[in-house]
Image: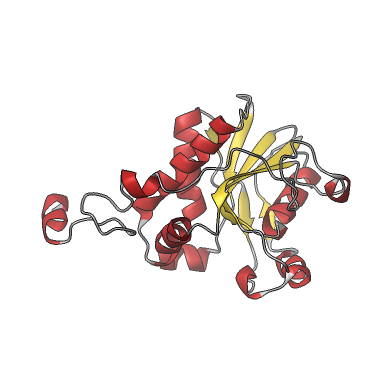
Amino acid sequence: MKKLIDIFFPKKCINCQKEGSYLCEDCLSLIDVNPFIYCLCDKMEKIHKCEKCKHRYLDRIYSACSFKNSIVQNAIHKLKYSYIKELSIPLSFLIIKHLQEVSCLIDEDFVIIPIPLSNKRKRARGFNQSEEIAKIISETTGLKLFTDCIEKIKNNKAQVELNKEERLKNISGVYKVKKDILGLNIILIDDVYTTGATMEECAKILKEKGANSVWGVTVAREIVDL
């Protein structure tokens, strides 16, 4: 059945329309992978948090590329809203490449946790895009994956519609921790980091439950004036 589908509805690159895959190697090579690290704010090349961000719960953020890249934007959009789950593979590749570029050393005692969707949104989409990316990162690194550690318990407005202050209020109390994570080092996986409100809220509740450290890892970083 799959072969018949591929014959009549062949996979085409979302950028150049070449048949064979949803993001061909040529177009993937057009995406610049960040060779540097941002602070939690928009300061570049900060392995440790700046004075402004010292009070925040999230310890580090690694973002593979800029959300300004039109191919990255299109790939994330197609993954989330056209339900092309296979795009999680090249997007995960970008994350792995970035972590190698910045010589990120991740100890084997880290566990990977994807940012969850509401049950309603996950049913509608058929999958959680962050979870699909997290699965590939877990398989590639050998790190344990906890897909049921954080639960979204409240439906809130889409963050993209809100400014920075509204995002912080909108995300408060939305998640709860379901697993024992006492003493664990955690890597949170999401698609895009903008203000960091979602990751900060998850890092907050994880540390309140005893997590040792919480890092964020995303496909893209969006620097906006909010």
Residue 64 percent across, percent down from the top left: 55, 44
Q: Residue at x 70, y 45 (%)?
A: 38
- Between 162 and 171, which is closer to the camera in this rendering? 162
Please state which of residues 134 and 23 is positioned toward the viewer in this rendering: 23
Q: How is the image coloured?
A: secondary structure
Residue pictured at 78% horizontal, 70% vertical: 165
The residue lying at 13 percent from left, 50 percent from top is 3
Q: In the visual, does 137 lie left or right of 182?
A: left
125 up-or-down from 20: above or below: below
Q: Position of residue 8 (x, y in %)?
A: 12, 61
- The residue sitting at 57% across, 34% down in the picture is 99
Q: Quadrant of residue 29?
A: top left
Question: Is residue 177 in view from this perspective?
Answer: yes
Q: Is residue 138 above or below residue 113?
A: above
Nearer to me, 225 or 132: 225
**185 with respect to 191 (left or right):** right
5 on left or right of 100: left
Position of residue 169 measured from the top left corner of the image (x, y, whole percent)? 77, 69
Residue 219 visible in the displayed image: no
How many labels, in total?
A: 0
Give the quadrant of the C terminus. Answer: bottom right
Coordinates of residue 35 in the picture (x, y in percent) = 59, 38
